[in-house]
Image (cartoon, grey):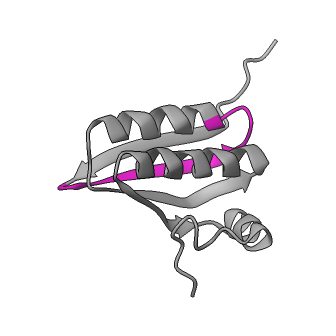
Amino acid sequence: MTEPQQSITVTSRRDGDAARVTIAGELDLHSSAELAAEISRVLDDAPAAVEIDARDLTFADSAGLRALLVARQEAEQRGVALRLTQVSGPLDRLLEMTGLREVLGVSVG
C-alpha cells in the first residue's frame, strides 16, 4: 500500500513588515487546512501585509477558494492586508468564473 502524496506545499517568509506565503500544488478540500494553518501562523507574527504567491498552484477547487477567502477574512479581522500577488492559470480561471479577482486583491493584466 502506498502512502498518499502531499498535494500541496506551503511555505512562508518574513520580509520586513510583510510576509509572503507561497503555495504550490493542489489547493482542495484535502489541502486547504494546511494553507489555513500557515496563514494563521503568519498572522500571529503580526505582519502589516500578507502576500500570497500562487503561481505554482496546479489546481484549485471551491474548497481551496474558500480557504483563500477565509484567510482574507482572518487577516482583515486582524487589520492586516492580504492579497494574491501571483496566480496560476487554473486559479486565474476560477477567480474569473467567480468574480473574485478584486476581492482577493489580484491585479489584472
In the image, residue 7 sits, relative to residue 90, either above or below, namely above
In the image, what residue occupies the spot 58% across and 73% down? 102
Q: Which residues are magenta?
A: 16-32
Quadrant of the image containing the C terminus: bottom right
Residue 94 screen position, x and y as percent: 75, 64
Specify the farthest residue to the bottom.
Answer: 109
Q: Nearer the viewer, residue 76 or 3?
A: 76
Which residue is found at the position 38% from the left and 33% from the top? 41
Quarter where residue 1 is shown: top right
- Is residue 76 rendered to the left or right of residue 71? left
Closer to the camera, 9 or 19? 19
Picture quadrant where residue 90 is located: bottom right
Name the residue nearer the viewer: 30 or 62: 62
Q: Residue 48, relative to residue 9: is it above or below?
A: below
The location of residue 30, given as percent across then percent down, is: 72, 31
Q: Position of residue 2 (x, y in %)?
A: 77, 17
For this view, does 4 lie left or right of residue 33? right
**Nearer to us in this view, 108 or 46:** 46
